[in-house]
Image (spheres, grey):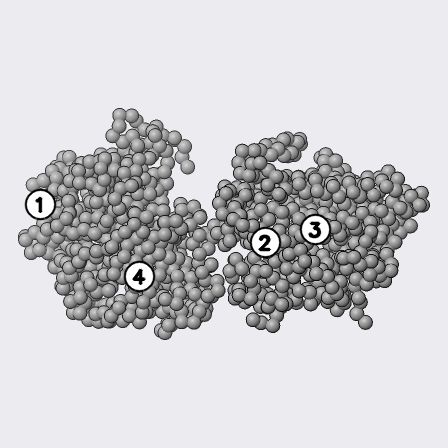
Amino acid sequence: MSNVINSERIPNNVGLSDDKRLQRALEEWQPNYLKWWNEMGPEGFQHDDIFLRTAISVDSDGWANFGHVKMPDYRWGIFLADAVKERTIGFGDNMGQPVWQQVPGEHRNALRRLIVTQGDTEPASVEQQRLLGQSCPSVYDLRNLFQVNVEEGRHLWAMVYLLHSYFGRDGREEAEALLERRSGDVDKPRILGAFNEPCTDWLSFFMFTFFTDRDGKFQLLALAESAFDPLSRTTRFMLTEEAHHMFVGETGILRVCDRTAQVMKESGKDHPDDLRKLGVIDFGTMQRYLNLWYSLSLDLFGSEVSSNAASFFANGLKGRAKEEQYEDHRALEGVYTIDRFAEGRWSRDDIPLRNAMNEVLRDAYVDDCQRGVDKWNRTIASHGIPVELKLPSRKFHRHVGANANLPIDVGGNVITDAAFVEKHDAWLPSAADKAFVQNLMTAPVYDPKQMANWIGAPKQGIKGRPVDFEYVRREG
Amino acid sequence: MADVHQNAAPIRFETSPERYRHWKLDFPSEYERKVARLTLDVQDNGGLRQGYSLKLNSYDLSVDIELADALSRIRFEHPEVRAIVFVSGKDRIFSAGANIYMLGLSSHTFKVNFCKFTNETRLYLEQMSAESGIASLAALNGTASGGGYELAIACDEIVLSDDGSSAVSLPEVPLLGVLPGTGGLTRLVDKRKVRRDYADVFSSLAEGVRGKRAVEWGVVDESPSRAQFQQAVELRLKAMVGRSTAQTRPSIKLTPIDGDYHEAGTRYRYVTLSVDAARRVASLTIRTPDNREPTTPAELAAKGAEAWLVRAFRELDDALLDLRFNYANVAAIEVRAEGQGENVLQAEGILIDHASDPLVREVTHLIRRVLKRYDNTARSLFALVDDKSAFAGLLFELALGADRTYMLDASGVSLRVSPMSAGLFPMATNLSRIQAHFYGDPSRAATSLAETSSIDTARARELGLVTFTPDELDWEDEVRMAFEERASLSPDALTGMEANLRFVGPETMETKIFGRLSAWQNWIFQRPNATGQKGALTLYGKPERPEFDFTRT
């Protein structure tokens, strides 16, 4: 086996040592991956020692090994969650039949597309976040950013493993293409819209990890139900890592809320300009960033009415999150009612449940988001500040689906185009908001003892280490 | 719809004159045995299936199987024949065409394959004239309607008795709400060059035309009185014999090929058809000769039907028909060639070295016809070239004719292009398969034809001769998925797609028959106006009148 493609360098539980096909594919792909990481990964920190979690097996001891490591030396591994014995297909037309260990030719293209679409988001987010290290609010946060980044890299490996092992030459070409597209690139953009949006400040980063990574969580939950067992097993393991990313987002925003509310209480001020002068982020700005990232992330679920979603479900390729909670796994009978705006008024349309599977998944996502927002509001309230962050209507600021590009306010009402333009800066980050946030974060905090003024300290450090631990050892 | 073919015994295509029930083949002495006389005398109750009676010399597949056999035997077993005459063994009726009740009792799939087979046989008759100088005459001593007239129009000449009642007609449109499905419309205008306004009238006139008008419109060549009918026929036949370009050659007895038919396929000496019903995939393997094959016409005559060139392709022909009629659910075919490629090159050498020899030419025509049958087989054809393969020369035509070719990228895997691909076996379009393959870039066909040694996978990829070249690590999975994917697609859409892509290039009468005519016919067959409860085909012979949905498309 080669010096690079071996089970020491690439921890795995997929039998890499005996899998000539996978070895061959990785031998070509891995150098290009490293090249991509060095070009598009975190800028300016590739030679530093970062306190990172590395998965070396899937058991409880193995999946979270901590230690200082230089990111390019990170051991990106390939893991499948343990096989479920005699697992059968849990939904759709093939329900009850044994799950597939190989890709059925019939579903090859659809599965490949699902995997490529999921896989594309992983490197995209690394690209979006590559400059954030230069404005970090603390070393603790800097380390979390890199943890998210290397794990998104590993999730790319997970999807590439599937492409390499089950999709032949087409799969290898798709795996290469995953390294060729670039977030925000005009000529070769990433596949999904939200992954081409700039994410150049830490407020956006926290919003992204809370809202956009949460879309990832729900996509992974739906894919974990797949009849294609290797996809199910790989996504189940990815979910354990994804939880940390959402933790970063949820606690990040929570700490920002905590700090702002604290300053408001101490200073007795509540006007945004005053708060900005005090060096914290006012809740209006936070609400506008929330509105932006929430609506961008809602788009990722696709159209409310989707024949693709119906066929993915019918064929057993992609289920609903936690499918076992439902009673009817065939979903042939039910309907789902959606609101549609046409010819000047709203109508309620019943569509077959299978065609509404994107919307069903979006429902679960919205509920999950609300739980996080409630926590933020409790923190704000604990300071006695009478402000609440709110999820806007899911019809607001959409670019995909039934309400795409309609002038709809945060309450879900259709307004005029002119009214929308007028209110834009009240609902979405304005140029001034962005400039303020960027300015606030100009100076990075590389001293482990320090924390930027605009964010509260976390309650605890990582893996029993103190908050001011040297999570990132800068070289020289 | 009722389907008399469902659960019935498989249909077999091998027969011989002593077993014919509907045709008599003889060689009248008045023409010094230079004329083969085919007398159609259909046994009413001698059809392939129960449930219909073949009255008025109407036919079903069993009648056409005998006709196809007779034509082959004339070519190989009766080299002295210079012309063919079709006559009726019944009084005042030549043939009423395909039996309508049989069609009504048949599934759509069967109807389509039945029409395709009868079309292939009609074209075979025309090829005998064009290729071997054996012209044919329809001596219509009674009415020829529908498929009866379509048999006549496939002949070079038609003589219709002017007896006040005998007519030729294509009554399908006015009586049955369908098309004449055996090339009648195409041949009226493309072959006989009947003016298209007359053809329009003729094709919508149930009783057809008789005598003088039939001659005026050009739907027959001559319409003598009853008294002069026989003499007119004789004159024409003698003229045909006189101008025949057919050459003397040895006779070859078409011995039985004796396929070992079983539930999941057939094993012949050189061909194996093996059907995987669960996957809906069949593999069709053709093996190369084991030993040295004839290199001279004399050796070929001595070996006769046992020569590999004859036997292997007769077996392939039978296997293709077996697939079409007896394995309707098979979606895709793995086309394989196995053995020693060198042996193919040795065996095929005679086709070039002795190309002008009349017996060699007959063998070439046989192979040409079988390859056309292959082109016209409505199943996905994927050729698989691996380390056991021998796609050399003539057998490489099977890969060129396939919808895709997968070639294993490994050492020792090769294929071989030979002059066999340079036009000896034209498709229905008159293009060679390699011309069709490289339709956009003829120079690439020339480059490939210039490759005189064996071609490895890298070179085949470079030349563009194959579609995909997975290596050993990918091969099994890639091929498995290709077939699984294919088998999951709509069979109707695949049939249409493949037929459109295979026959790239110019139209000929043949492509029009299998493309335009058949496609329209198969559409009409599916429409309620023909086969719905009140459809014209459904209600034929019943007291009710059809009810049409008069919407024009």
Q: Pick the quarter of the image with the C terminus of chain A.
A: bottom right
Cα gap from disc 1 to disc 3, whole angstroms: 96 Å
Q: CA distance from mark 4 to mark 2?
A: 46 Å
**Residue A324 to residue A170: above or below:** above
Looking at the image, do the residues carrying marks 3 and 2 touch, with CB atoms under 8 Å apart?
no
Secondary structure category for the residue under label 3: helix
Mark 1 falls within which chain?
B
Element under label 1?
A: helix
Q: Quadrant of residue B46?
A: top left
Q: Residue at x 78, y 42 (%)?
A: A375
Which of the two discs, 1 and 3, sits closer to the camera? 3
Left or right: residue A35 versus residue A254 is: left
In space, the residues marked 3 and 4 are separated at their CA atoms by 58 Å
Residue B230: assigned label: 1
Q: Nearer the viewer, residue B92 or B308?
A: B308
Check chain identity for marks 2 and 1: say if they share one: no
One can see residue B531 in this view: yes
On residue A82, the disc is 2
Q: Amino acid at mark 4?
A: Ile
**Would residue B127 appear left or right of A433 to someone viewing this image?**
left
Three-letter residue code for mark 3: Ala
Q: Are marks 3 and 4 in contact (CB under 8 Å)?
A: no
The residue at 72%/47% (across/down) is A211
Amino acid under disc 2: Asp
Q: Which mark is residue A243?
A: 3
Marks 3 and 2: which is nearer the front? 2
> Circle 4 marks a residue in which chain?
B
> What whole-number distance in Å separates the C-alpha atoms at marks 4 and 1?
48 Å
> Mark 4 = which residue?
B286
